Image (cartoon, rainbow, N blue to C red):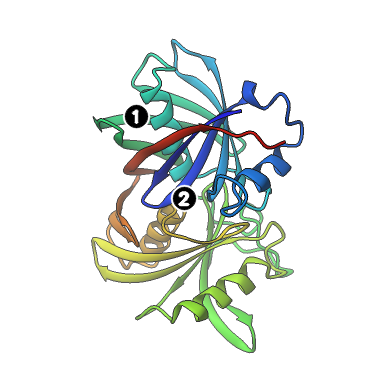
Amino acid sequence: MKFIKIHSLGNDFLIIEEAETRDFPDISKLAWKICDRHTGVGADGLLIISIKNRKKGHVNFRIFNADGTEAEISGNGLRCAAAYLYQQKKIEPSQILFSTSAGQRVCELIERKKNHFLIRIEMGIPRLSSQDIPFDDGSPHEKIIDYPLSISHESYPVTVISLGNPHCAIFVDRFPARIEWHQIGREIESHPFFPKRINIEFIRVLSREEIEVLFWERGVGETLSSGSGSCAAAVASILKNLTEKKVKVRTSMGQLTVEWEKEKVYQTGPAEIVFKGNFLSN
């Protein structure tokens, strides 16, 4: 089974075309096996794509976390899938329309230097109500900003949104020790108020134009960056009036740019093709 490995600022994915999976009826099990960093290829997630219209650039997109669970969407994953399609010349236009379980997303190539790509992607309209996220503490909420979430006998003010997948933002003056924020992330991910679990962003505001973020992703754990997480962190910062509507998001391995224009959120960031291979285990 042929695959290509691509990363965006250290958030790495394996990309497989749907036709290659015909001998693997259980895609969740395949994702769990191939993403294992000891007995598989190793990645944060598996992307399954199928090209529906080469001339128009229409592509179906699915993403599975390293633990085999299927997610709704991934900003970094979409940019990585786009880089693959551009590099392999699988589509004709410079603009791609991805169909995901969270809706359609438009992706555009900004620049290419060999196997390095700079790509801008539309991430949709942020959803703020508790029903849309989903968030369930027994009461409906139009917005969830600085909600006092209790874990381990402590309370954390959290801002919760959805960009097709759920996110919980925590603002800090300084980042906790790694073991501490890992524990916080792990507990919040599976908190009973989040029926579909949740991704967590730890955010430090540097200025009105820049933030720094650490990421804990459901089904994965710590990731070096996150596209949808970066957007969620920027949106949370804007909602709290801590930044302007164009924000540089600093991650562990570089930066992304997030813009909230009118209703929709857009993100511009890199993707780099690492290698291709053939997965033999079934």
Q: Amino acid at mark 2?
A: Ser
Q: Position of residue 259 (x, y in %)?
A: 32, 48
Q: Residue furthest right?
A: 25
Q: Is residue 139 above or below residue 48?
A: below
Who's the residue at 35% across and 44% down the image?
A: 267
Who's the residue at 71% across and 42% down the image?
A: 28
Residue 228: mark in rendering:
2
Q: Position of residue 3 (x, y in %)?
A: 53, 31
Q: Amino acid at mark 1?
A: Glu
Q: Quadrant of residue 268?
A: top left
280 with respect to 117 (left or right): right
Q: Quadrant of residue 186?
A: bottom right
Nearer-the-camera pick, 144 or 230: 230
Q: Residue furthest bottom?
A: 153
Q: Is residue 258 above or below residue 167?
A: above
Who's the residue at 39% across and 17% down the image?
A: 89
Q: Position of residue 12 (x, y in %)?
A: 46, 47
195 with respect to 102 (left or right): right
Q: Position of residue 169 (x, y in %)?
A: 48, 67
Name the residue carrying label 1.
108
Residues marked 2 and 1 touching at CB (< 8 Å): no
Distance from Cα at disc 2 to Cα at disc 1: 17 Å
Q: Crowding at label 2, few (<14), some or many (≥20) Cα neighbours within 10 Å?
A: many
Q: Is residue 182 above or below residue 141?
A: below
Nearer-the-camera pick, 280 or 10: 280
Q: The residue tagged with tag 1: helix, strand or loop?
A: strand
Q: The residue tagged with tag 2: helix, strand or loop?
A: helix
Q: Is residue 150 above or below residue 144?
A: below
Q: Quadrant of the C terminus?
A: top right
